[in-house]
Amino acid sequence: MELQRKKRKKLQKSLQGCLFVLFVLIGFVPMRLVNDVTGNMVYKALVNQKTSEVQSQCTVMANQLTKDGYLNNLQAGGAEAELEVLSSVYDARILVINSAYVVVKDTFSLAEGRINTSDVVFKCFAGTPSVEVNHDGGYIVFTRPIYNSTGDTISGVLLMSASIEQIGAIDEQLGWKSGLLEIILAMVLVVISAILARVLVIPLYKVAVAFNRTAVGEKEAELSRVSVDDYRETVLISEAYNKTADRLRILDESRQEFVSNVSHELKTPLASIRVLADSLLAAENVPEELYREFLQDISAGVDREQQIIDDLLTLVKVDRTKGELNITKENINDLVERTMKELLPIAEKKNVELVLESFRPVVAEIDALKMSLAVSNLIENAIKYNNDGGWVRVSLNADHKFFYIKVADNGIGIPEESQEQVFSRFYRVDKARSRESGGTGLGLAITESVIHSHHGAIRLFSKENVGSTFTVRVPLIYIA
């Protein structure tokens, strides 16, 4: 497994590496294309320039040979010398071919007296002079007609082959220099791309370091906040991280407080039982009445311990099975009525009046057992934390989407500073009175968990010494 994890880690893409490659490609590919295109353009421009220049000189020379009647007198008008000069200037070989396709003049003195029946010569005699560039061979072939004295008949052809090897050498030299420059620029591009890619991902490294510090539980990280405002995206990541860190801090504080409260709540009855038991063991000749009183106190402590454990198990079960509700269609009116009947003895004991107001029949998709527990906790708290002779009013209503249960009382109320914490586990506004009434501080936490598991909401409105009102809203149709 560890080996596979290492392999996957090696195969993971690095954003910095991807940015580096991207920047190199963005810089190098256009540079390479520009270099190639520029080189080709320079070469073609030089070839076109020489072609135009030589073609012009070739035309002038052919006209001069026509004017001098060179084919009739090879020594006429100094044409011989002009041909040699033209050949030397343009590094060219010049052939003069008569109407019998015989080479009468070759500036290289290699083909004089021989027959030349090449295609370009035939085309020129047919009235189509040509210009052909042979890049592989490194030369340009020109043909121009030589007319007779009257100028109406082609009596010969001037064939000129000019070398472009010098242009090729220039192009090769330019290519070598541009290649060297390209290498230098590529090295600079690699360095700049590496620096730029590194700079761009630094904000992400900052966020990663912050997360790692929190993961290992450093105290400074637990109290610090991340602010990486280099880019809009890192601002969003920082905000999300800070929200997550705040939530984790709250959860950690809640966990520590929960563990502390559980320990305290479990130890308190045990400590009382231990003191009572030790007192009985240490005393001699204890009257039966005192034994009975101590044993009743011990029994009450055991009941208290059992109640705390039962509520804890209920809370754990509700949390664990939030997504495993046993949803059925239930008559909410009947559910509320049954719950109130079960709590009626407690209300009568405190002389508290229980009133139910049902505005319409309500049927909803709920987990009946858990919802009954939530409603029971609300009504029981309204009775327990009420004054003798008080009242508790429960109302049930619904619209097209939700049903609403309201539990109102005229009891002791909840101080404003404590209202945000009443749904916290083990939180009690008046700890002494809560213990007297048998409260564990878990009832409202269980209720809130049940309501939230049904995608509902619970709200509290309370005023000290006036009373409290809890309003529950739950969807009629459960959506998983």
Image (cartoon, grey):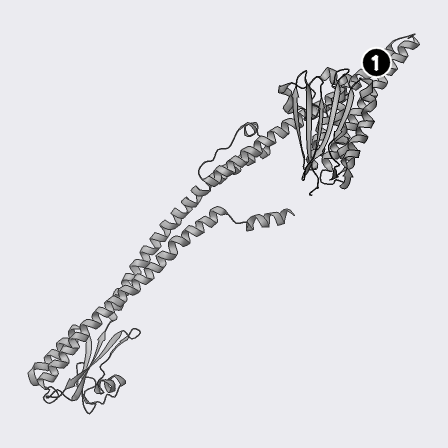
> Tag count in the figure?
1
Quadrant of the rendered structure where residue 301 is?
A: top right
Looking at the image, residue 288 sits to the left or right of residue 46; the answer is right
In this rendering, position of residue 376 left or right of residue 422: right
Residue 134 or residue 388, whichever sits in front: 388
**Mark 1, secondary structure of its residue:** helix
Q: Residue at left 27%, top 66%?
A: 43
In the image, 313 versus 273, the foreground residue is 313
150 relative to 43, above or below: below
Report the front residue among 183 and 458. 458
Residue 222 in view of the camera: yes
Question: Residue 165: image x %, image y %?
Answer: 25, 71
Q: Position of residue 209 (x, y in %)?
A: 52, 36
Quadrant for the C terminus, please. top right
**Residue 441, position in %: x, y?**
72, 23
> What kind of residue is marked 1?
Leu
Identify which residue is drawn at 76% across, 38% down: 367
Q: Which residue sits at x=39%, y=57%?
A: 29
255, 213: nearer the viewer:
255
Q: Inspect this view and state whether residue 217 appears.
A: no
| Residue that mark 1 sits on | 276
Kindly indicate the quadrant of the structure image that contains residue 460: top right
Residue 477 vs 451, above or below: the answer is below
Q: Residue furthest left?
A: 77
Badge 1 crowding class, 10 Å Cα cut-off, few under 14, some 14 to 19, many 20 or more, is some
From the viewer's perspective, is residue 325 above or below residue 254?
Answer: below
